[in-house]
Image (cartoon, grey):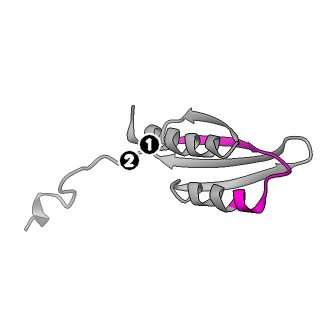
């Protein structure tokens, strides 16, 4: 399992432990986590949710009258190391 996917699974597990229903999906350059947020989520739970989301690369909240509130987070794929990218004329 790629590192980004493992990080996303860990974030999803922590959000689930807070009572949120989560979904994890792999994409080409990142792994996403979505969670349905109940209307009656207490303020203390929001603080805990934000602490969990601090481990993501990006996150946000979508709210609409049709879909309710969906929390999302993304964990980027690691950029592979390329070694010396300065080229042969610029080596030390």
The dot on residue 4 is: 1
The dot on residue 78 is: 2
Q: Give the left or right position of residue 29, taking residue 16 as reference.
A: left
Residue 2 coordinates in the image, percent (x, y): 39, 36
Q: Secondary structure at mark 1?
A: helix
Ranked by sequence position, the earlier of labels 1 and 2 is 1
Which quarter of the picture shows residue 21?
top right
Graded by Cα atoms within 10 Å as few (under 14), some (14 to 19) or many (20 or more), the crowding at tag 1 reads many
Residue under the point 92% across and 47% down:
65
Residue under the point 71% across and 49% down:
71
Tell me: residue 49, above or below residue 31. Answer: below
Magenta range is 31-46
Graded by Cα atoms within 10 Å as few (under 14), some (14 to 19) or many (20 or more), the crowding at tag 2 reads few
Tell me: residue 59, above or below residue 21. Answer: below
Tell me: residue 47, above or below residue 64. Answer: below
Q: CA distance from mark 1 to mark 2?
A: 7 Å
Q: Secondary structure at mark 2?
A: loop
């Amino acid at each position: 399992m790629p590192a980004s996917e493992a990080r996303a699974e860990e974030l999803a597990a922590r959000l689930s432990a807070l009572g949120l229903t989560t979904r994890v999906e792999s994409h080409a350059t990142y792994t996403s986590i979505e969670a349905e947020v109940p209307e009656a989520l207490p303020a203390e739970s929001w603080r805990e949710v934000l602490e969990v989301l601090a481990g993501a690369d990006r996150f946000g909240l979508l709210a609409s009258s049709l879909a309710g509130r969906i929390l999302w987070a993304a964990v980027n794929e690691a950029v592979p190391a390329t070694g010396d990218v300065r080229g042969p004329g610029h080596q030390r």
